[in-house]
Image (cartoon, rainbow, N blue to C red):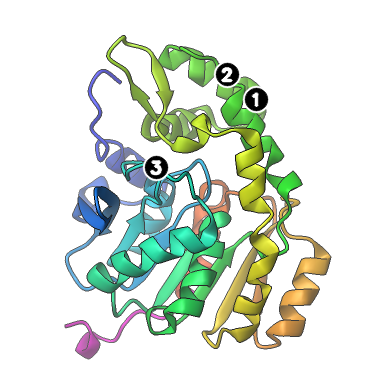
Amino acid sequence: MSCYEEFALLPEQARELGLSPDGVPAVRREALEVAPDRRLSVLVWGRAAPELVLVHGGAQNAHTWDRVALLLGRPLIAVDLAGHGHSDWRADRDYSPRAFAADLASVVHRLAPRALAVVGMSIGGLACLALGSTHPELVRRLVLVDVTPGARASAATPIVRFVHDAPRPATFEQLVDYALASLPGADPVALRRGLFHNVRRGQDGTWTWRHHLGSLDEDEVFRVASTFPSLWPDLAGSRAPLLLVRAGRSPAVTDADVEEVRRLRPDARVEVVDGAGHSVQSDDPARLAELLRRFVPPRRRDERR
């Protein structure tokens, strides 16, 4: 951890997935200005025109999609939302889905205007839903991973508690021990790897969260969550083919939420990933990659230019 080399773990993850570590595609990081004095950071996978846009959940970052991206082997972009990963924090502290969507519109327009689908997990999914409402031309297909506008503030409580109860200041090993104690049953290797991308080292040698959520008051986080129901009309008005991926072990999406999705969008496809928690992309990347392959067929060879 003394030197942050963010792509150094990709070959290791490829081996875990049964893939050749020599086959890891080219990945680069780009920073785009989305507002005066504020930039968004993006991972660009592959050299061809991106076919997918992947958007993480709260307190995560673009690297949460690494294993899904490796399994897919397709050109895509994975975005660090404002206040997360390597993207700048917002001075106005507005981390609502609609604020995220405005940033996404700028990024997708410049880096992936012909993307076949936009995939968002948790609040990232709601941001993608809002993007489809304001810029339907950028959202040809929409995948929501374990989220609907029915998401409740109470569902965010475990994440908020985990972020705010972390020891400060801390060594990296103290954060690892804290996370292992807070998340029983978590894979220690995957957890350590996730923290590697989600914390940063200060000049005094201690470690803190890379994302801004760790600096927000709980009331601010819950205030954002209270805006989620306002996105039901966005879902109802969307015409993009819709896939809802529900995590089998997560309370984030209820049966009532699924019924409402089906009422508003009878054409929606709903899939359940048994055994997965809220972060489906981490708990069962193979199953999620399979669902994405089925829902978003690769671009034909004659369409790749």
Give residue 178's mark: 2
25 or 105, which lies in front? 105
Percent x, y of residue 100: 45, 58
Alpha carbon separation for disc pair 1 and 3: 30 Å
Looking at the image, residue 163 lies above or below residue 293: above
Q: Secondary structure at mark 2?
A: helix
Q: Quadrant of residue 89?
A: top left
Q: Is residue 304 magenta?
A: yes
Residue ID for mark 3? 91
| Label 2 packing within 10 angstroms: few (<14), some (14-19), many (20+) | some
Residue placed furthest toward the right: 256
| Amino acid beneath label 2 | Tyr
Looking at the image, residue 66 lies above or below residue 139: above
Q: Are marks 2 and 1 in contact (CB under 8 Å)?
A: yes
Q: Which quadrant of the figure contains the N terminus?
A: top left
| Label 3 packing within 10 angstroms: few (<14), some (14-19), many (20+) | few
Q: Quadrant of residue 48?
A: bottom left
Q: Residue at x 36, y 69 (%)?
A: 105
Q: Is residue 74 visible from the viewing direction of this image?
A: no
In-image side of 207 versus 290 (left or right) = left
Percent x, y of residue 37: 24, 48
Residue ID for mark 1? 182
Q: Residue at x 27, y 50 (%)?
A: 39
Q: How many marks?
A: 3
| Amino acid beneath label 1 | Ser
Residue stretch in magenta = 294-305
Q: Is residue 225 magenta?
A: no
Work out whether mark 1 precedes mark 3 in sequence or the reverse, and give the earlier one.
Answer: 3
Alpha carbon separation for disc pair 3 and 2: 29 Å
| Label 1 packing within 10 angstroms: few (<14), some (14-19), many (20+) | some
Q: Is residue 175 visible from the viewing direction of this image?
A: yes
